[in-house]
Image: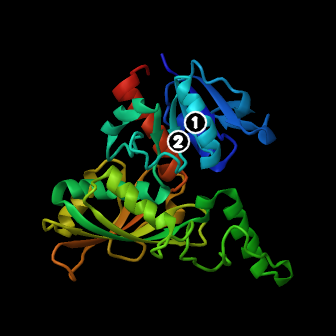
Amino acid sequence: MGYKVVVVGATGNVGREMLNILEERAFPVDEIAALASRRSLGTEVSFGDKTLKTQDLDAFDFTGWDIALFAIGSDATKKYAPVAAKAGCIVIDNSSLYRYDPDVPLVVPEVNPEAVEGYSKKNIIANPNCSTAQMVVALKPLHDRAKIKRVVVSTYQSVSGSGKDGMDELWDQTKAVYNPTDEVAPKVYPKQIAFNVIPHIDVFLEDGSTKEEWKMVAETKKIVDSSIKVTATCVRVPVFVGHAEAINIETEEFLDEDEARDILREAPGIMVVDKREDGGYVTPVECVGDFATFISRIRQDSTIENGLNFWCVSDNLRKGAALNAVQIAETLGNRVLKKG
């Protein structure tokens, strides 16, 4: 016996990935519904070898459905997630709306799978920010061994993190560079993204950080350990898919780079590709479509007593969003619902 699953926002980048990953991972689905807004009503989406027609989110009755994977913005989630939850359907939400709610678990299954058991307070589980998700997968096994005190991270985040409009803007501006008569003014981003990098993701806060940077701080504390200090600089780069991060950690106990490499090789969800030679590391273009979080360039930081540096790359549409949501559903099924 499997589950009745709803994918909300099925026509977007993340919603389509959710459908792909449910099929790829053979999630036990008895029945599936693809929902979208009325302007996308009837749009066809793929689920394995099946074609689904999207149904109207506004008119959908969630009663009798087990799990709803939400891939819509916070405003729409605020309206529809409580409706689904009240109908008895467990919501796994990809927006930022519930991430900091103390009554809603924020889950990365490789890190804190036990947290799914707290879903019952609101019948909602939150999916973390894409940049946080891949980082905490790498931090957790190192934290368990040597207790991380402080994290310094700089991100290199792809335009797919802004959705289809961000990807279109990079494509159009790139073409315009070679054809000056087709100049494309920035709309999604505050400055040109093609052949450029922008140290600004989300809105600025009073202390000079951006909300994206604040999210990495707050979510790491909620998912891994509230005592970890985190400072982040988040940068948008002209890459279509795949986020990269340069991470520096300071630990309470000394952790040798070789031991760290061995720990990460054995950790769930991680693939270590770390050769000290040309091309002996993973870049965003190589991680697209993969489930793993890739770790490279592991090395001692000699400027502090107990420090390590490493490079972290992952497909943000997968581990940063759709894959993590499906993994939460799998964890929920294995630990709580036990129907599949």
Image position of 308 with respect to 81: above or below: below
In the rendered view of the protein, which quadrant contains the C terminus?
top left
Vertical placement of residue 188 versus 106, above or below: below
Where residue 187 sits: x, y (%)?
Answer: 73, 70
Residue drawn at (26%, 73%) of the image: 299
> What type is the residue that disc 1 sits on?
Ala
Residue at 27 percent across and 61 percent down: it is: 228
Q: Is residue 212 left or right of residue 149?
A: right
Element under label 1?
helix
Residue at position x 39%, y 55% in the image: 219
Height in image: 70 above or below 146?
above
Residue 81 - label: 1
User: Dot 2: within a 10 Å radius of its alpha carbon, few (fewer than 14), some, or many (20 or more) residues?
Assistant: many
Residue at the disc numbered 2: 93
Mark 2 element type: strand
- Taking the spot 54% from the left edge, 64% from the top edge, the residue there is 285
Nearest the eye: 164 or 295:
164
Name which residue type carries label 2.
Asp
Q: CA distance from mark 1 to mark 2?
A: 8 Å
